[in-house]
Amino acid sequence: MYVVPSAKVSKQGNLRWIWQYGKQDKGKVILAVILFAVDKVMTLVPPFISGLIVDQCITYGLTDRLIPLLVIQIATNIGHMGLRYSYEIILQLFGQNTIYRLVSDEFEKLHELDFHYFNHVKNGDVMNRMTSDTDAIRFFISWVAMQILDCVVMFVSALVVMFVMEWRLALALMILSPFMLVVARTMAKKAHGIFYQIRQSLSRLNSCVEENIEANRVVKAFAREPYEIKKFEKHNQDYFQRNMVLAHNNARYLPWLDGMSYLLDVITLILGGLLVIQGHMTLGVLVSFQSYEWMIDGPVRMVGWLLNDLEHFQASCIKIRGLLSAKSRIVEPDQRTAVSQIAAVKPVPKEVVREVEKSTASSTPSAKFLKSLPPIKGDIVFDHVSFAYPDDPNTLVLNDVSFHARPGEKLGIFGETGSGKSTLVSLIARFYDPTKGHVYIDGVDVRNWPLETLRSQVVLAFQDTFLFSDTIGENIAFGNHRVSNPEDYEETGLADSQHSESGDADSDDLNYQHRVQTAQKNRADSGFIRQMAKIADADDFIGRMPDGYDTVIGERGVGLSGGQKQRISLARALADNPSVLIMDDTTSAVDMETEAAIQKNLRRLSGTRTIVTIAYRISSVRDSDEILVLEHGKVVERGTHDQLVALNGRYADIYRKQLGLSMGADMGR
């Protein structure tokens, strides 16, 4: 990240905080300020020249001085335009660079956060922070901040010049300044809370729109368009009302600021005219005064709008800083602890161990450290594991679960909806940490495995499939894209689906070399993607599509059936070539014939990786080496299919019911 969240950063004001993202362009800012300063000096010249033209050329008839004075007037105006263009372009570049870094940090932060965070935040709120809130900050640092400085500099500079020219008239104009300050400050104070409420209301509005876009088929299926329109109108009305509150706040104070700016004109004309009549100042000085008064009048008129933009910036900063300061409950292990725990049970090069022990503790494992780790074999142990979600710590979703799945075995997790099946496998990939007990992968607590290493070799094919708006081939190869050149394969340990057949599965070194070789081969071989699709029984229907594997599918897989999306999702998981493949009810949307074909293909992988299958269909788990039957988070039965049927318990009861349905279906054909 460009700016690492810390206690020091969290205590900084919003301006100092955003400067952390922009200080890399400090040279650009200094250049812009220098150009700005020269420009402001040149801006003070034309009013003075105007006064000289009136006094010398018109009043005293010194016409020979008119041309030189006009040349100076024109030159300063041209210089002003060139300088203003230059520093505004520089500031726009500064603002875009700053926002580029900020958005990069926001996106990286989103990928650092765990499931718990996304369970409690709406997509529309996140999108609002990434777009409109970020743009409000860009607008402030690129334009508003310089306008505020411009107003302050012009107000003070013009006032100093006016005091030098005629202190009595300048002092009269200063009488209104305290009143302007009080009005502006009151307006800003009231606008602060209003802007934050507007941002919150906009987030809710965006969330409503996004939900309806994603759920448009459900809405139409239940004919709930009127209800959703009414719900949207409620959010839209709330957003309208909060903006009207802001409008009323502006209407209450801006007329006072405008009125006082008009009074400056009145004071200048009346008092300045009297001073000219009495001979205390020339007509040319009054003309210059009138121009300088515009330099005071402009900032007074702008102050209300600039304060609104400032409060808009403050509200957006609060929301974005809230995202960047969010804490993930799942954190990377300390590098020293990780290497000591892994090296105790698996071969890690001694020089790497010594280097890590000498280095300072780091929460982010280095690339060299990750590269040195041997591949995961797939030995899974649950040791008296209990789990409760943080929102409801008193309700155990898993209760004292223990089992051991050896490398290459197939484990079946069977149970009804809500029994804790998906939660159990989420602990294997460490999407959550157990409340009690331990989960071990290859003898190492999952909390001591680097997340990249763990999740690159423990892959889930979720029941709720998500497909990207891309080609089918790219969707299947998504996990395989973790690396981008042959050298990187040494870090991932990819291998083809039949690598263990040609070597000793117990030899890490041989297994590792085989993975590297097959990965280099498969990465460049489009046939590998098709091979994975064949295992998932997806090759046939993909081949019938207009462009085959190059067919672009809609967002979230729109246009594909549920079964087709599940098969592509399974092929994607297989393409990642994991040591542990977890299928979370992956074939729930396919027919029994297709499921049987998939199960037949998966048997070819027997012994090459540990396969964990979650299902409510017994046909999906019956050939497992061990089946766990879950009820209310507890393992109530365990054994092979034949053992559980002979046990005549819960599993056997469901088996007989499903067997009867299957036979009935066959007879009805």
Image (cartoon, grey):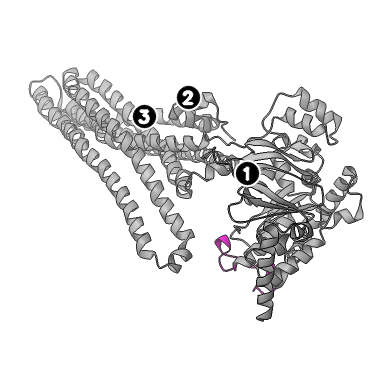
Q: Earlier in the sequence, mark 3 or mark 1?
A: 3
- Res 75 seen here: no
Q: Earlier in the sequence, mark 2 or mark 1?
A: 2
The three-letter code of the residue at mark 2 reads Lys
Residue located beneath label 3 in the image:
149
Question: Residue 550 colored magenta?
Answer: yes
Q: Is residue 296 left or right of residue 265?
A: right
Marks 2/1: CA–CA distance: 40 Å
Please tell me the numbered disc located at residue 11. 2
Residue located beneath label 1 in the image:
398
Q: Give coordinates of residue 551: x percent, y percent.
A: 64, 68
The three-letter code of the residue at mark 1 reads Leu
Q: Give coordinates of residue 348: x percent, y percent.
A: 84, 34
On the image, which quarter does residue 427 sit in?
top right
- Judge by depth and name the residue closer to the eye, 564 or 636: 636
Name the residue: 84% across, 54% down: 607
Provide the residue span drawn in magenta. 542-561
Establish if 543 lies above or below 318: below
Dot 1 surroundings within 10 Å: few (below 14), some, or many (20 or more)? many
- Res 113 seen here: yes
Q: Secondary structure at mark 2?
A: loop
Q: Is residue 569 left or right of residue 149?
A: right
2 and 3 marks in contact (CB < 8 Å)? no
